[in-house]
Image (cartoon, rainbow, N blue to C red):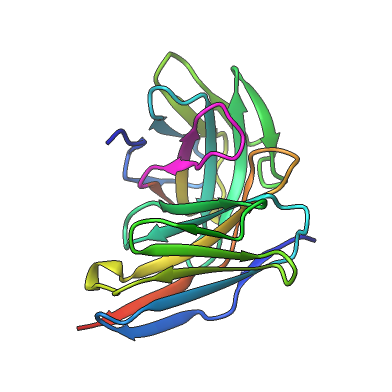
Amino acid sequence: EPEVTQTPSHQVTQMGQEVILRCVPISNHLYFYWYRQILGQKVEFLVSFYNNEISEKSEIFDDQFSVERPDGSNFTLKIRSTKLEDSAMYFCASSTGTVEEPQHFGDGTRLSIL
Amino acid sequence: GESVGLHLPTLSVQEGDNSIINCAYSNSASDYFIWYKQESGKGPQFIIDIRSNMDKRQGQRVTVLLNKTVKHLSLQIAATQPGDSAVYFCAEMGTAGNMLTFGGGTRLMVKP
């Protein structure tokens, strides 16, 4: 069964440094998403991406965040200058182009900011 | 603001029994709901979904019930197995886009 893959599984970064989290969505999916889950809290929506542009974003997704689809298979989340409170699990998800279809999640990247 | 919440944070059941996990939602405009299972160290795994024009949907050993009158969603797992032990999240999607709003999660523990 096709799946969303994320790398790395764990990223440790010094505060203030840039970090890039990588995702390979399911190949025939057209919508891509990033969510995050701070330890012990709910999964929170960050951003959705369709047709090479952001379609929705939450208030969490401020100017420090950006997303990119640099080629036909990868989808990346960049945090420009990390803060301690960015420590969380970051999940990538993808879905087909139709509304009301399930989003399929990767196993996440654990981001630890020191 | 709108939110999705869960009634029970932890549910412990005996292997072979049926499990019922509940979820309340407050956005009456939500029209699509999903149940996810999250095992330790893994991402949310899709279990079953339901659209607002339905009140029941069945899968393999799982059933989702939607009561729009009281804005309540439940996940029923038949003959619960040790492999069902995980955290279960409900998530809802409104009409404005594809953003999912997740509930807080219920931990299901299956005793052998």
Q: Does the image show residue A113?
A: no
Asked if the magenta segment contains residue A106, the reply would be yes
- Where in the figure is residue B109, as x and y percent of width and height? 33, 79
Q: Is residue B45 shown above or below A31?
A: below
Asked if the magenta segment contains residue B61, the reply would be no
- Where in the figure is residue A46, as x and y percent of width and height? 61, 43
Residue ID at (68%, 29%): A55
Residue A19 as seen in the image, left or right of residue B7 = left
- Where in the figure is residue B79, as x and y percent of width and height? 29, 74
The residue segment tinted magenta is A92-107
Using the rendered view, name the quadrant where residue B4 is placed: bottom right
- Asked whether B40 or B26 is in front, the reply is B26
Q: Is residue A12 shown above or below A26?
A: below
Q: Is residue B6 shown above or below A3?
A: below
Specify the farthest residue to the top: A71
Residue B39 as seen in the image, left or right of residue A36 = left
Using the rendered view, name the quadrant where residue B60 is placed: bottom left
- Where in the figure is residue A44, as x and y percent of width and height? 59, 53
Q: Quick one: quadrant of the C terminus of chain B? A: bottom left
Q: Does the image show residue A42?
A: yes
Number of numbered discs overlaid on the protein picture: 0
Residue A10 as seen in the image, left or right of residue A101 = left
Residue ID at (49%, 41%): A103
Magenta residues: mostly which secondary structure? loop
- Asked whether A80 or B47 is in front, the reply is B47
Q: Is residue A48 shown above or below B101?
A: above
Residue ID at (33%, 36%): A3
